[in-house]
Image (cartoon, rainbow, N blue to C red):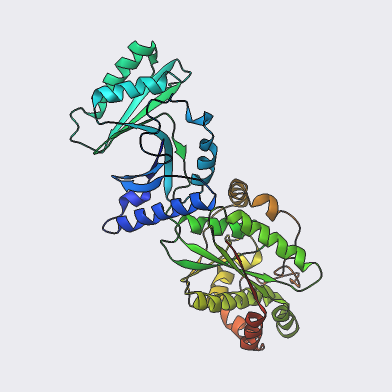
Amino acid sequence: MLIVCHYGEIALKGDNRKFFEEKLVDNIKKSLQHNGIIFNYVKRISGRILIRLESEGESEGVKLLPFELRKEFHSFQHVLQKVFGLSYFSFAWQCALDLAAIKNKAIEILKNENFTSFKVETKRSNKKFFLSSQQINEQIGEIVMEGLNKKVNLHNPDITLYIEITDNQAFLYTKKIIGPGGLPLGVSGKAISLISGGIDSPVASYLTMKRGVENIFVHFFATERGYEQSLEKVRDILRALKNYQEKIKVYFVPFSDVQKAIVLQTRADFRVVLYRRAMFLVANEIAVQEKAKALITGESVGQVASQTLDNMLAIEEAVSLPVLRPICGWDKQEIMDLAKKIGTYEISILPHLDCCSMFAPEHPATKANLAEVKTQEKKLKLKKLIKNALKECKVEKYE
């Protein structure tokens, strides 16, 4: 039994396409192994990746049951739907690159399926095969009509038989299972994700993972009563994200001393901007340690006072690294919908102690002037505060 995996964007790569393919193969292997799933091999062939679930020839002569009835189906599906880089995959049967063998295999597969109408859809990566895709469709369609007494319906069939003609073999299957798409995790380097207990930042992390970015997390917490419960909530969010990135590393940074200094020594309306600048500076220091290339935030333009363009500019100026904002153009409903899909929403909506909202002014600045922000910041012993916060931070790993 085989799984034929297809990728989308990787196929558009040039000379470095092999690098992306090999990373995807490696990620598939690690995901299967991590979930305790036994497989024979994972390998690249022309324009696709094959996963063999059993030894060569094991399924020959065995009744070709629909894969949904086999015990391995749901385990593989659950894992592969979380491997970035896969556009879709299919549980498939293979046969020799011979028209008679393809006809026999088609009948063998479809006689165990419950359907009235069908169509055949063929793709040829091997253009040397003596029949065109359309000719194969016609010949296989004819044998199914005659052998199983079924009707062709090209627009709304009960079932579609997919056939792939490759250099050395043919693959046949009846279902495409959609993958997450994107690029293989790790191909785009590392970035520091400022993760909160809210809805937005986990979604931003997921979207950068989908672009091949390995996330290292930083969470800022207030050491006030109830903070341990908030930390556990963040851990639960990270465990949910672990479905998409197997190795999680998080820095828990105490932030109360920084906040108190800002509250006591600076203008109230600039507090949130100064909080965020301090957070970015801490994250930037961690990025240097981790050799990360960017910061990631869950900011969405205009959603709250600190997320106006003026304030974003004043905050981002504090660091030299690029700041990635994957959901900056999304509305809240879009963000919530994706949070539900990836399994973080129900955790994120639980109450928690949010350090950014603590000591928040009644009327925060929405168009912070950078020069004035810097003037206020000079009142702080910021380097010392950041150094102490980093010294007191705790690092946790989930593998």
Going by the picture, which residue comes out furthest to the right? 225
Residue 129 position, x and y percent, is 20, 32
Q: Classify residue 271 by image quadrant.
A: bottom right
Would residue 227 be found to the left or right of residue 210 on screen?
right
Specify the quadrant that holds the N terminus: top left
In this rendered view, identify the residue nearer to me: 353 or 213: 213
Residue at coordinates 43% horizontally, 47% vertically from top-left?
86
Residue at coordinates 62% horizontally, 47% vertically from top-left?
340
Residue 346 position, x and y percent, is 69, 50
Residue at coordinates 65% horizontally, 66% vertically from top-left?
305
In this rendered view, identify the residue nearer to me: 384 or 102: 102
Asked if residue 357 can be seen in this view, the reply is yes
Residue at coordinates 56% horizontally, 70% vertically from top-left?
312
In this rendered view, identify the residue nearer to me: 121 or 79: 79
Residue 25 position, x and y percent, is 39, 52
Count of numbered badges drawn on the protein: 0
Above or below, comparing residue 2 to residue 120 in the picture: below
Specify the quadrant that holds the C terminus: bottom right
In this rendered view, identify the residue nearer to me: 100 or 308: 100
Asked if residue 369 can be seen in this view, the reply is no
Residue 171 position, x and y percent, is 33, 33
Above or below, comparing residue 386 to residue 51 in the picture: below
Would residue 261 be found to the left or right of residue 43 on screen?
right
